[in-house]
Amino acid sequence: MTDPSAQPNTYRGLLWQSAQAVHAPGLAILSSILTGAAWVYPDAVRNDFSLKFPYALALALGLVIALTVLTHATLKAFDLMQRPLPAVRSARAASYARVVCFLDPSPLFSHGAGVSFFLLEDGKYELFVGVGGVVNVQENGLIQVALIDVQDSQEHVVQKLLNNDTDLLKKLLVKPTIPYAEYSILKG
């Protein structure tokens, strides 16, 4: 079986990360200490019901830990689903392209795939910037994409990218597809 920490974007990996994030091992130790205290001092706790208090305490604390881990993992999964496209981290000049952008890891992109660049305006309109391709998927998961052909009306985007304008980097979307019209032009 593979190590869950090696699969960060699977639900199993998210559960593992969540268990670490909510300090589940520490909470389990704390619940064991509280359960032990309930065993040592049984008279300090009223015991009117059929389930012995130490068992009930251990069960309740275990459920709290499990629910906390599941809730944390589920919220993180929903957060990851909010923007399935990877964020653009930075951009650099290159001799073989107008600009090379570095994207967060994503299973959507593979080496040599065609990509299209869009600029998100007003949080809802995507303006076509240009096309390019995946140059490399690095060992650490970062994706290098080259912007090769830019729309004439979007030349200002190239300059802002070369300056690593943080506002522009947040608004730049890189999609793992090429619009049909651009494909026809590239095909010749």
Image: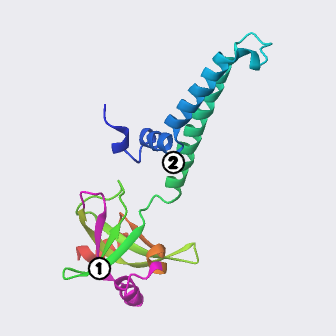
Q: Is residue 177 left or right of residue 66?
A: left
Q: Is residue 155 left or right of residue 127?
A: left
Name the residue: 32% across, 75% down: 131
Q: Position of residue 94 (x, y in %)?
A: 22, 81
Which of these two is toward me, 113 or 138? Answer: 138
Marker disc for residue 77: 2
Above-or-below relation of 29 to 51: below
- C-alpha span from label 1 to label 2: 31 Å
Quarter holding the C terminus is bottom left
Quarter holding the N terminus is top left
Q: Position of residue 13 (x, y in %)?
A: 42, 42
Q: Is residue 82 left or right of residue 146?
A: right
Badge 2: few (under 14), some or many (20 or more) residues near its Cα, within 10 Å? Answer: some
Locate residue 115: give its quadrant: bottom left
The part of the chain drawn in magenta is 138-166
Above-or-below relation of 94 to 37: below
Marker disc for residue 92: 1
